[in-house]
Amino acid sequence: MPTPPPHPLQGHSSTSSFSRSLRTSPATGVRTGTVTTIGPDGPSTGGGRPNGTGTDRPSPSRPRHGLRWGIGGALVASAVWAATILTVPSLINDDSTPHTPNVAGYRMVDNLCTTARLTTFSQLYPTPSGTPYHYTTHHRALDEMYCSQYRKKVGGDQDYYTLYLQVQLHHEVDPRPEFDAQREGLAQRRYQISPVPGLGDAAYIGYLDDPDRSNPGQHYLTQVVYVRQGGMTCYTSWSASYQDGKTAAPDREQIRTALLSDTRELLRTLGGPV
């Protein structure tokens, strides 16, 4: 470890010293005299002040000068702060406080599968297959309802059509950024995206025809609808598959109409203004 340098007051010889010869005047009470300073060039005599009077009286102007600067500095700082909070309101209004979204009157239900009538899809695929799966969860920040079910056109039909329904009520976090991010994510996955005017605050529908890489004649189809209204987000999805030359491809426009119709019906049933 290196040796620390000597203390400034240690290890150094003094380069100057001084002596005073002062006396107090009985008449004025002022201390006068001479001050002898011994510097590198020898002794010199002066009054201890630039004017050489030797008067050892404190100057009354110094405290007032410092006081003026202190008050002036405080006034300038106050003016700067006032201008700052007017132009940067977030210094007073804490932007970290989460914005509370309005759920627009939507309510929670225990079983989304029984609440969703799916009037149009029930006409296209009247036969349920298996038992629908559902859940409902509650949290002060997010309530969620989910339903999935399989349906067929007729009892002996080997082709299954899957429906997914999900409704979320966001109570603390604005869902708009994630809603837009989901749309961008679908586009990156090669979904064909188109807006749906007049549904919620924002809505879009996506369509994907995804051929099987090992069997190009096999197609997996998906259509989805995303809706946002205030703090409510709704997701409905239909998926199916078909084989070229063996089964007919489902009517894309027919599925689109059914998705939009049953989504509107579901949101009205949940108390929304759609």
Image (tube, rainbow, N blue to C red):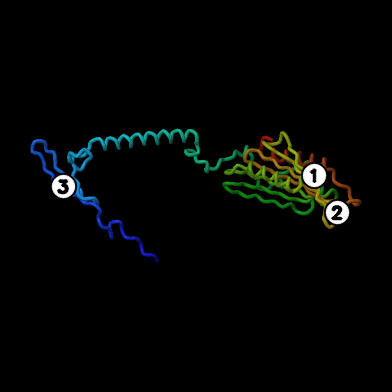
Tell me the kind of residue under disc 3: Arg
Q: Are marks 3 and 2 in contact (CB under 8 Å)?
A: no
- The residue furthest left is 26
Q: Residues within 10 Å of mark 3 (few under 14, many from 20)?
A: some
Q: Nearer the viewer, residue 47 or 82?
A: 47
Badge 1 local density, few (<14 within 10 Å), some, or many (20+)?
Answer: some
| Three-letter code for the amino acid on which mark 2 is drawn | Pro
Camera-nearest residue between 182 and 266: 182
Q: Residue at x 15, y 44 (%)?
A: 34
What residue is pinned by disc 3? 20
In the image, residue 129 lies at what x, y percent? 79, 52
Instruction: Tell me the CA gap for discs 2 and 1.
Output: 30 Å
Residue where numbered disc 2 is placed: 216
Instruction: Report the residue that reaches farthest toward the bottom.
Output: 1
Sequence-wise, which precedes: disc 3 or disc 1?
3
Identified at 11% across, 38% down, the residue is 29
The disc placed on residue 122 is 1
Residue 56: x and y in percent read 18, 41
Write down the quadrant of residue 119 in the picture: top right
Q: Nearer the viewer, mark 2 or mark 1?
A: 2
Cα–Cα span, label 3 and label 2: 108 Å
Q: Secondary structure at mark 1?
A: helix
Q: In the rendered structure, which disc, 2 or 1, sits on the residue that comes first in sequence?
A: 1
Q: Secondary structure at mark 3?
A: strand
Side of 234 relative to 62 (left or right): right
Tell me: 118 left or right of 29.
right
The amino acid beneath tag 1 is Ser
> How many dots with numbers?
3
Of mark 3 and mark 2, the one earlier in the sequence is 3
